[in-house]
Amino acid sequence: MAIPKPSLVLCSVLTFLTLNYGPCHVFAKVYMVVMEDDPVVSYKAGRKNEMRGEEAQKYKEMSTSKHDVFLESFLPTGSYKKLYSYTHLLNGFAVHAKSEKAARILSGAKGVRLIQEDIKMAKMTTYTPKYIGASGVWPQLGGAENSGDGIVIGMIDTGIDPKNPSFGSFSDQAKPPPPNFKGMCRSGDRFPPDSCNGKIVGARWFARAGQASGEFNATLHFASPYDPDGHGSHTASTAAGNFHTPVISRGYNFGYASGMAPGARLAIYKAAYPFGGYMSDVIAAVDQAVEDGVDVISLSMAPSSVSSGPASFLNLLETQLLLATKAGVSVVQAVGNGGPDASSIVSFSPWITSVAASTTDRKYNKSITTGNGLVFSCGGLSPPTPGETMYPLALADDVSIANTTDESNGCQDPKVFIRSLVQGKVIICMIVSSNYYQYDTYAGMIDTIQKIGAAGVVITDRYTGDIDYEYQPIFPTAVPSAMVLSGVDMMNLIEYYENNTARDGDGGVITFGATVRILEGRRASYSGERPEVAGYSSRGPNIENSQMELADVLKPNVMAPGHHIWGAWSPTSDALPEIRGESFAVLSGTSMSTPHVAGVVALIKQRYPRWSPAMIMSAIMTTADVTDRSGRPLMARRDVGAVVAATPFDMGAGAINVARALDPGLVFDAGYREYLQFLCAVPGVDEAAVRRAVGASCPTSRARWCTDLNTPSVTVARLVGSRRVERRVYSVGGENETYMAYVRAPDGVAVRVSPDEFTIAPGGAAALRIVLNTTAPGNAFSFGEVVLRGDKKHSVRIPLAVYPAAVLGP
Ligand SMILES: *[C@@H]1O[C@H](CO)[C@@H](O)[C@H](O)[C@H]1NC(C)=O
Ligand SMILES: *[C@@H]1O[C@H](CO)[C@@H](O)[C@H](O)[C@H]1NC(C)=O
Ligand SMILES: *[C@@H]1O[C@H](CO)[C@@H](O)[C@H](O)[C@H]1NC(C)=O
Ligand SMILES: *[C@@H]1O[C@H](CO)[C@@H](O)[C@H](O)[C@H]1NC(C)=O
Ligand SMILES: *[C@@H]1O[C@H](CO)[C@@H](O)[C@H](O)[C@H]1NC(C)=O
Ligand SMILES: *[C@@H]1O[C@H](CO)[C@@H](O)[C@H](O)[C@H]1NC(C)=O
């Protein structure tokens, strides 16, 4: 077979999936080149097993020097710098070249399978263990401190602050890492050698592309695994932060935080920075993590757009993650923050567990009361104004010498306030909605109020509009503060103020008569409310390629809490100016939901060490909740204020339920061969494209449709007439169990499952056939489910998402 000519596949932007991060930047001339030669994991040459130890090391060294020789023979000395050799999952390298000509030379060179241009990555308590039921299973796993023991979670993120109490040593001091983990710790600035204390078992950093582009600054970004941003510490603490860590911020104890798997270990691969990151650094991090022997990879980053390659499943990062899966590593990735628009997901492939973000039922109840007895419900994590007394209220404009409430910048300048007028008063500062995201604005306001010695601050919208719950900033302040969220409340507050303020002919204030009291806002209450899909959480349907053709793969896979999540923070970070110096922060985004699932994967892996990544994903998906305890469907936030019943394109299989995920009854499995069959069935993808992307040929037995992949979901983007979908389940229960199939057919579709009843022994397998027929063509997806209910109480839910396009012709 002829070796296909390498093509230049444009790479896509990788982004952080926390809200409120900055823009995308220009990219450096870095190219990632994949060679025809085998990487360590797939080097065959007559052997059955993967190379290990010294042999693998030798092969790595040989591959690395081959890359050097290759570059020397094609490119003039001094015209390039090799940044990395990739040897474990991929055989290739990243090179920083001075001219674009290098790319042309390399893509034409013999031995090159693929070349892809690098691009800048933009950045896109906890009480949650109880909310999703993780703490309920800790007793089965040897108690909180042992839950996740033996499992290593690889965090590919912005690093970690090893001094955060979430990552302190276990009580019995520096346990050795699990025997299969071979990673190492690189010490350095703010990351002393004792940072690897048994909780943190490995730590490295990858910044060569950032250095090549000139953006990496060792003073700001630390030439060590230390986290200059906060994002990486936050996600790591959610996955595996220590049990019962006091969350103290601005001197107040907000409660006790635990990761989902408090006994799991953390391996840190710092590959992103406050300025973003590069895909070539991330690829190097993933390669190293798998080589080191992590069990789970948590990736709160993803491409922000579909690459222009033959398929979204074939971009270099997705295919590398396939190889990680092949090596037995579960990959959990954020689904994106592009919601609520349809097809806004940025994590595409069926081997990745892509996580949507939900709200939780935790609320901070902050309110203010006025002198005439009005009570306004507010946002803000602050102390109350001292005592039972009422404090005079003043609009910032009325106590300053100039027009201080500048449109974009209310209450930012202490100098303009008249000190004698502000003493002891609560000041009303106004903000415009376009600045809700600008955390600097809040930091500036709080700072101003502190400097001028006012008693507190009430923040309102300048145009008295509603401030959506989702966009409300949540950060603790030392000074009493409150944000009025409802537009009606804002109008009433201003009216009350004006009613009680006497003015002269020029509008100057003669007497301030309005009074207010800010109440305690730092105590959480738990309403028991069902989770809602956060508005920003990216939505399906999944897309196959940059032409936005729809794929027969469900995304997102599952949903976990991602909104207003407490987690560890880096005190040196400048990312959120209002909490500079603090060790904990409340963040929102699919970045935050992802490590929840990574922690749960660790719990399942501890319990069932032999399960494949697909089985673990299946256990999480088939047991997820789609209703609350009283049977009401889960909801999704759409446009501001609109809440509708959630579909699988909002929440995947549903809200993660940890107790059930540890006892799923049946699982769907799939391995590398099935994923290859899947790739070879993607419309528009030929054998050559698959070979170029993953270096393997299509299996001889071909799948006809992408729907043939054995996933615990069925998505048909275009159902013309009839589609037969085969599935195979394995029993992981402890006794014989008889299952009955219950179907809720999507509108316009007839569904038959056969057999509709079967008995399965422990370790046994059963084949299922699901036939879907269009009965009434429509112009939208419709949703349903197949539920396999066992007589031993297991319940296995398979979501259906079908677009009934046409009935069969005569
Ligand atoms: C790195 O950052 C520090 C601190 O902001 C600054 O003083 C220094 O000039 C920067 N170095 C470079 C090379 O930009
Ligand atoms: C919130 O605070 C107000 C005022 O202190 C109180 O009346 C109300 O009951 C509280 N609500 C909850 C849910 O705690
Ligand atoms: C203050 O400035 C804003 C625009 O920045 C303007 O609309 C407003 O009229 C000014 N107010 C006074 C009292 O000058
Ligand atoms: C302001 O005064 C008017 C007229 O007395 C009264 O109708 C209105 O209810 C007052 N508003 C508030 C918020 O107190
Ligand atoms: C399960 O069923 C098989 C036959 O179908 C039987 O031989 C076996 O004893 C049963 N096992 C249990 C635990 O009931
Ligand atoms: C689907 O259509 C096929 C072919 O027309 C038919 O044989 C089958 O019974 C139908 N199945 C259902 C569930 O309607």
Image: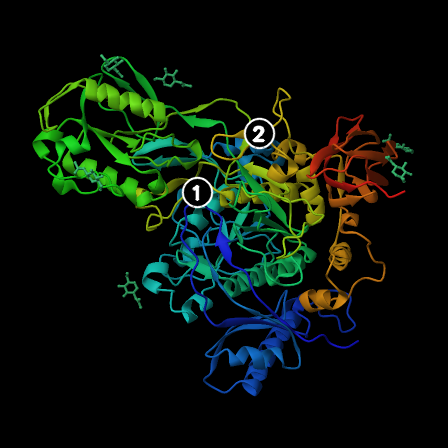
Label 1 neighbour load within 10 Å: few <14, some 14-19, many 20+: many
Measure how far apart labels 2 and 1 are at the Cα level.
37 Å
Residue 16 position within the rendered picture, expressed as x and y whole percent measured from the top left: 48, 51
Quick check: 810 left or right of 532?
Answer: right
In the structure shown, which secondary structural element does the residue marked by tag 2 occupy?
A: strand
Q: Is residue 519 visible?
A: no
Q: Is residue 722 above or below residue 516?
A: below
Give the residue type that dot 2 points to: Val
- Residue in the picture at 48% in, 72% down: 29
Is 441 placed above or below 466 here?
Answer: below
Residue at 10% from the left image edge and 28% from the top image edge: 508
Q: Where residue 355 sits in the image (x, y, percent)?
A: 58, 43
Query: For the residues carrying marks 2 and 1, which lies nearer the camera in this image?
Result: 2
Scheme by which the image is coloured: rainbow
Depth check, front residue: 502 or 753:
502
Kindly identify the amino acid type of the residue bearing the numbered disc 1.
Ser
* Dot label at residue 394: none
Camera-nearest residue between 708 and 134: 708
Of all residues, the one furthest to the front in this rendering is 810
Q: Quadrant of the N terminus?
A: bottom right
Residue that numbered label 2 is attached to: 644
Residue of label 1 = 166
Using the image, determine if residue 299 lies above or below residue 599: below
Q: Where is residue 206 drawn, in percent x and y?
A: 47, 63
Q: Quadrant of residue 782?
A: top right
Give 788 or 10, whichever is nearer the viewer.
Answer: 10
Q: 245 left or right of 561?
A: left
Within the displayed image, which quadrant is ligand 5 positioned in?
top right
The image quarter containing residue 557 is top right
Instruction: Tell me whether circle 2 and circle 1 mark residues in contact (CB < 8 Å).
Output: no
- Side of 517 relative to 256 (left or right): left
